[in-house]
Image: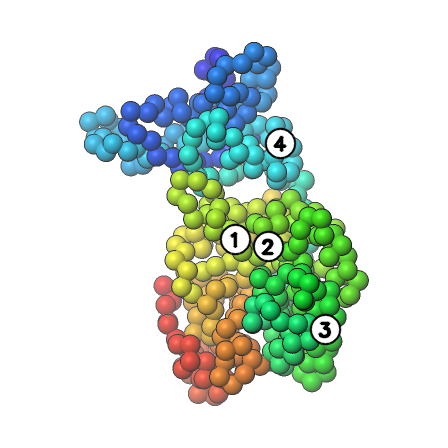
């Protein structure tokens, strides 16, 4: 195979329909990284581990991957600088998008699915896609602006609660929790990701029961709380589950994109007219390895947005999960910064969220976020409604330029929450 067909400069790649993937890899210093990258570019596209007949020059031109860059980390220039037995690299490979059309399954197969042939243990740390490829993905229908219009909240962060206990409840028991929580005036109440469509608590039955609870709370408060129903289900039952929930009056749906698959998630989001929330549950199995999988800003950010998530539940560095700040920021940016034609997805800050963390979230990303508190609401000493009010009081204090301590003097719910859950005061 002619070497010229497996290497390219980035400037040339950008003018064509290639997906530019960046991988992290570690190799023994005896391994030729140039040959390893070339083997991967061929093995993920037209070839395999041994030469095979039938490969034509036209195939090489139109379908073969190309090595675009190999970066040493640290950026060695001289062989005399190398003392480690294990070398670290970032490899960039460009794949013709014609190989996998405008879809998730074959894209993932190309990016990460043929490692047995390439013998490369890599982690996908970045992916740049051409507009021609992304144009087929509709992205969020509502986005940040649409969600603000739907909820009637113009400037402040939105507030979401997930019902606790996570599972094991009946629709009637859940409706009781929903009602007590909705009296505090949250914008959304969602199912926990652990409660899908089990036989003891069908999701369409929850839709009916929770919508009735939402209406009862609305009649007392004048604030509508939207129930987000978790329709994550098997491929065999998914469409029936979605249809029955919509027939029952569902106003928003939630799916776990990792366990369901991005492709099925996309199919649902493009079919329905209600907002769709994406949940990151189980994404750790793809993200947390250093030598395999893909980075979380792709799995929870870029791909979730492409699949049509109007809102995305994501983790933060502040709630106990050891997420790095740079991955947290990169994920937020993938969800919200301009990306071709797509509307921005509204990030949901979850995982150990309580009023004491509100200043940090707003400092990080402003008010176009959703504050998702579970235990801090259902576990508030004064009750769930007070837990919601404490979250909203904290948010209002920050946007008014007050400290939480100052606001707590006039708000018993906030003062109680700060005493119970703490006031970390990160403001990093």
The residue that label 3 is drawn on is 209
- Labelled pair 1, 2 in contact (Cβ < 8 Å): yes
Which quadrant would residue 219 be assigned to in this image?
A: bottom right
Q: CA distance from mark 3 to mark 1?
A: 28 Å
Gap between marks 2 and 3, in whole Å?
A: 23 Å
- Is residue 408 visible in the rendered structure shown here? no
Cβ atoms at labels 3 and 1 below 8 Å apart = no
Q: Estimate the spatial distance between the alpha carbons at disc 3 and disc 4, rounded to whole Å.
A: 44 Å
Q: Considering depth in this image, is 26 or 129 the residue closer to the camera?
A: 26
> Where does label 2 land, which residue?
256
Name the N-terminal-most of marks 1 and 2. 2
Q: Dot 4 corresponds to which residue?
A: 100
Count of numbered badges drawn on the protein = 4
Callout 1: SS: loop
- How crowded is the residue under tag 1: few (<14 C-alpha within 10 Å), some, or many (20+)? few
Marked residue nearer the N-terminal end (2 or 4): 4
User: Residue at coordinates 59% horizontally, 17% vertically from top-left?
Assistant: 59
Q: Nearer the viewer, mark 2 or mark 4?
A: 2
Label 2: element kind: strand
Disc 4 element: loop
Residue 140 falls left or right of residue 77: right
Front: mark 3 or 4: 3
Residue 282 tag number = 1
Relative depth, front residue between 354 and 285: 285
C-alpha gap between disc 2 and disc 4: 24 Å
């Amino acid at each position: 195979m002619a070497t010229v067909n497996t290497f390219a400069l980035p400037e040339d790649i950008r003018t064509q329909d290639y997906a530019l993937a960046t991988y992290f890899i570690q190799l023994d210093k005896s391994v030729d990284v140039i040959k390893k990258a070339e083997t991967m570019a061929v093995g993920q596209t037209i070839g395999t581990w041994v030469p095979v007949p039938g490969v034509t020059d036209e195939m090489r031109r139109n379908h073969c991957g190309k090595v675009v860059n190999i970066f040493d980390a640290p950026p060695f220039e001289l062989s005399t600088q190398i003392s480690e037995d294990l070398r670290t690299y970032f490899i960039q490979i460009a794949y013709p998008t014609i190989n996998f059309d405008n879809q998730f399954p074959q894209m993932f197969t190309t990016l990460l699915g043929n490692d047995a042939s390439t013998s490369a243990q890599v982690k996908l740390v970045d992916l740049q896609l051409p507009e021609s490829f992304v144009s087929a993905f509709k992205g969020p229908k509502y986005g940040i602006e649409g969600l603000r219009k739907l909820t009637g909240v113009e400037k402040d962060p939105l507030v979401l609660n997930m019902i606790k206990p996570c599972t094991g409840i009946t629709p009637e028991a859940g409706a009781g929790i929903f009602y007590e929580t909705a009296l505090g005036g949250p914008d959304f109440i969602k199912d926990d990701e652990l409660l899908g469509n089990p036989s003891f608590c069908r999701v369409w039955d929850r839709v009916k029961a929770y919508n009735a609870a939402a209406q009862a709370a609305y009649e007392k408060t004048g604030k509508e709380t939207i129930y987000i129903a978790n329709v994550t289900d098997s491929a065999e039952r998914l469409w029936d589950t979605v249809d029955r929930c919509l027939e029952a009056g569902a106003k928003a749906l939630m799916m776990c994109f990792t366990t369901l698959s991005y492709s099925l998630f996309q199919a649902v989001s493009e079919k329905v007219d209600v907002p769709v929330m994406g949940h990151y549950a189980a994404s750790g199995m793809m993200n947390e390895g250093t030598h395999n999988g893909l980075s979380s800003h792709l799995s929870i950010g870029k791909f979730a947005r492409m699949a049509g998530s109007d809102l995305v539940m994501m983790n933060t560095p502040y709630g106990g999960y050891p997420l790095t700040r740079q991955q947290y920021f990169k994920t937020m940016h993938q969800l919200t910064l301009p990306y071709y034609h797509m509307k921005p997805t509204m990030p949901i800050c979850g995982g150990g969220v309580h009023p004491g963390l509100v200043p940090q979230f707003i400092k990080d990303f402003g008010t176009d976020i959703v504050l998702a508190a579970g235990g801090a609401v259902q576990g508030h000493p004064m009750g769930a409604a007070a837990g919601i009010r404490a979250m909203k009081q904290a948010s209002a204090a920050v946007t008014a330029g007050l400290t939480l301590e100052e606001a707590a003097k006039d708000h018993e719910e906030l003062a109680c929450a700060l005493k119970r859950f703490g006031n970390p005061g990160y403001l990093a």
